[in-house]
Amino acid sequence: MTSDDLFDEIATDLAPRGATAGAMFGKRALKAHGKAFACLKDDLLAFRLGDGTPAHTQALTLDEAELFDPSGKHRPFKDWVAIPIAHAETWPHYAETALNSLNDWSVRPSTASPAT
């Protein structure tokens, strides 16, 4: 099964929960509530798991998993982990985890300094 086929399966499985297929940086992506939570780049599926979360830490322990660098210019997104197709059996779990975390993102306190 190709990475595109697996992506399509995940999109179908998560559609009842509000996930839709779209694009991010010209790549196929999964979004909910207007926010991307997964992005397919070649044979890597990247998930927005949140830097420092248990899921983020766990995902980075997988062989060849890395912070997601969509531009390829050594500027990775710290909240995203790209997982290679060799670990495709984990993709549905991380997609669901990333989708679930979107609610957490919407209620996170701002890191900006309070106005004085």
Image (cartoon, helix red, strand yellow):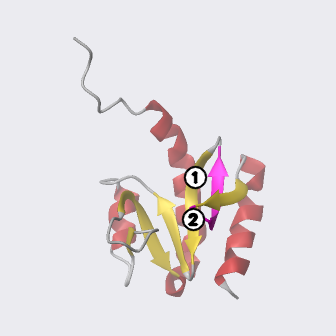
- Mark-to-mark CA distance, 1 and 2: 7 Å
Q: How far across and down, in percent of the image, does residue 77 sit?
A: 38, 59
CB under 8 Å between discs 1 and 2 = yes
User: How busy is the neighbourhood of tag 1: few (under 14 within 10 Å), some, or many (20 plus)?
Assistant: many
Q: What span is in magenta?
A: 25-32
Q: Quadrant of the C terminus?
A: top left
Residue that lies at the very extreme toward the left in this rendered image: 116
Residue occupying image coordinates x 68% and y 86% = 2
Residue occupying image coordinates x 26% and y 15% = 115
- Is residue 26 found left or right of 17 in the rendered image? left
Label 2 sits on residue: 39
Q: Quadrant of the N terminus?
A: bottom right
> How many numbered circles are shown?
2
Residue 2 covered by magenta stretch: no
Label 1 sits on residue: 36
Residue 28 covered by magenta stretch: yes
Residue occupying image coordinates x 29% and y 29% = 112
Q: Which mark is residue 114?
A: none
Kind of residue at disc 1: Ala
How would you classify the magenta stretch by its main secondary structure? Answer: strand
- Is residue 106 found left or right of 115 in the rendered image? right
Depth check, front residue: 26 or 29: 26
Q: Quadrant of residue 71?
A: bottom left
Against 85, is 68 above or below? above
